[in-house]
Image (cartoon, grey):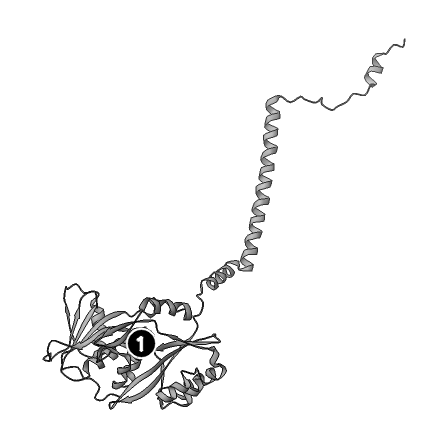
């Protein structure tokens, strides 16, 4: 066995690396927590960077304005179809006065290929301005304006134009559904050239088979051996909505008004009633007052705001406003026409 001397031992290479030091449990836990902290910090940094990038994209695309435009388009109400009205009047003279023996109200709705309207019997019992409850045919005795006001009052729809012709021509044209011919046979009309041409173009395209005149729903009433027809309002409301899409609310007048003649001037109450009808009032009764000694027109409110009475005074040009706490289901306001009211001098 070879012996190793002192010199040999000194020449033996010696490693200078320090021996590994074993970590304790606490040190290992600290290192683990430190690693997790930096991983979480890196994840948060990535998330913030992504959020910032998305914000820039939204701003550049201006998506908010796009959403607003879509919302505004969605809320825009659909445009209502245009509706034109034309009243055909078949006139005949009896006992020195003209009567409307034929009445047909044509209602044209934009986009419809067919034409529909009301056929109104001459003995329909309605409020006629200046006459009270009377046959609708009697309205022509005070002029065409009284006829149109009467029809507007009980049907609740504006009459834009009229065509007056003899009853003989009315039978041969309107009752035969030949509306273009009725225009050509007109004795009188308030249509201007542009309106006449527009109706003429529409009627030329329409065949008689495409015209439907609906008989006005009414029930017979016998009075003094004479038969009248009372309009059935509920059925009229139903047919307006069904045929033309016009609701009762759209035709409803703001005020129900009684007009009484307290001036003694013939036609004063009728003239006042026509003015009020043309300003969205519904006349429920016209007759003479208890006397003809009213110097000033009276506007009596039963219920509702005073502004209603102020509206009537503005239309009539005169009127003293009073309020009476009397239960009244027939009307909202009564107008007693006094001597201060200036009615038109002549009827048409």
The image quarter in which residue 124 lies: bottom left
Percent of width and height locating residue 198? 44, 84
Q: Is residue 284 above or below residue 6?
A: below
Q: Is residue 240 above or below residue 159?
A: above
Percent of width and height locating residue 117? 40, 76
The image quarter in which residue 42 lies: top right
Horizontal arrangement in the rendering, residue 26 relative to residue 96 (left or right): right
Query: 317 and 194: which one is in front?
Result: 194
Label count reads 1
Residue 276 in sight: no
Q: Residue at x 58, y 39 (%)?
A: 41
Q: Residue at x 38, y 89 (%)?
A: 186
Report which residue position mark 1 lands on: 152
Query: 329 and 121: which one is in front?
Result: 121
**Which residue of the protein is positioned furthest toward the front in this rendering?**
225
Query: 290 and 193: which one is in front?
Result: 290
């Amino acid at each position: 066995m070879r012996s190793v001397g002192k010199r040999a031992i000194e020449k033996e290479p010696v490693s200078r690396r320090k021996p590994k030091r074993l970590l304790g449990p606490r040190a290992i836990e600290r290192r683990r927590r430190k690693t997790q902290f930096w991983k979480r910090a890196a994840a948060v940094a990535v998330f913030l960077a992504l959020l910032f990038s998305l914000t820039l994209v939204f701003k550049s695309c201006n998506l908010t304005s796009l959403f607003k435009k879509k919302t505004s388009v969605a809320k825009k109400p659909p445009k209502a179809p245009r509706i034109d009205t034309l009243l055909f009047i078949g006139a005949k003279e009896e006992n020195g006065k003209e009567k409307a023996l034929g009445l047909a109200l044509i209602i044209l709705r934009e986009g419809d290929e067919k034409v529909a309207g009301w056929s109104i019997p001459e003995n329909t019992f309605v409020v006629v301005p200046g006459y009270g409850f009377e046959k609708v045919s009697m309205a022509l005795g005070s002029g065409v304006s009284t006829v149109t006001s009467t029809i507007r009052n009980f049907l609740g729809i504006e009459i834009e134009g009229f065509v007056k012709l003899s009853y003989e021509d009315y039978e041969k044209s309107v009752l035969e559904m030949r509306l273009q011919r009725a225009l050509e046979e007109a004795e009188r009309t308030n249509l201007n050239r542009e309106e006449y041409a527009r109706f003429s173009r529409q009627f030329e395209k329409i065949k008689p088979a495409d015209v439907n005149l609906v008989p006005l729903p009414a029930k017979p009433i016998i009075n003094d051996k004479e038969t009248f027809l009372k309009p059935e309002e509920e059925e009229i409301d139903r047919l307006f909505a069904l045929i033309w899409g016009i609701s009762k609310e759209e035709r409803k007048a703001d005020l129900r008004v009684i007009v009484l003649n307290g001036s003694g001037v013939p036609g004063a109450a009728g003239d006042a009633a026509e003015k009020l009808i043309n300003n969205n009032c519904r006349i429920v009764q016209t007759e003479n007052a208890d006397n003809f000694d009213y110097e000033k027109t009276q506007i009596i409110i039963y219920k509702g705001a005073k502004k209603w009475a102020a509206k009537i005074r503005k239309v009539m040009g005169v009127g003293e406003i009073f309020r009476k706490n009397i239960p009244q289901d027939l009307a909202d306001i009564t107008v007693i026409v006094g001597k201060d009211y200036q009615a038109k001098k002549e009827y048409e």
